[in-house]
Amino acid sequence: MTDARGVCARSATDLSVNAPYVRGWAEAKHAADRLAEQLHTLDLDALFPQLKADVNVFGEGIVRLGTIRPATAQALATLIMTGLTNEVLRRAAAEDDPPTATS
């Protein structure tokens, strides 16, 4: 599912023979459900009312966020950057800690 930027292809309105639509959609559904759970945990699920799984004409699963407000996009970017920063810090701390010897 790629456009010129490698992002999205048209939706699967014209189905193609031999494309693994069910597998692609199932992968997208799993990812959309995980995202919905996390958004719910953060009490942000109402900001993404159009979140859903879909599939393109090549059978690739896609997750649609729907139309969102600029503030919502900025909040999502901040959450992603916060998560990445925490992960980097966690890994750096793990590398700095010497392994403990057990007898």
Image (cartoon, rainbow, N blue to C red):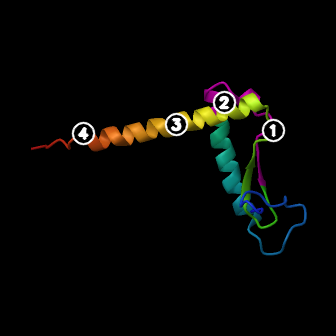
Q: Which residue is mark 4?
A: 97
Mark pair 2, 4: CA separation? 33 Å
Judge the density around disc 4: few (<14), some (14-19), many (≥20) Cα neighbours within 10 Å. Answer: few
53 or 3, which lies in front?
Answer: 3
Q: Residue at x 26, y 40 (%)?
A: 96
Dot 3 amino acid type:
Gly
Q: Position of residue 2 (x, y in %)?
A: 75, 62
In space, the residues marked 1 and 2 are separated at their CA atoms by 17 Å
* Residue nearest the viewer, comparing 11 with 31: 11
> Residue at image x 70%, y 52%?
28
Q: Is residue 47 magenta?
A: yes
Name the N-terminal-most of marks 1 and 3: 1
Going from N to C along the chain, the mark reached first, 1 or 2, is 1
**Secondary-structure class at tag 3:** helix
The CA distance from mark 3 to mark 2 is 12 Å
Q: CA distance from mark 1 to mark 4?
A: 44 Å
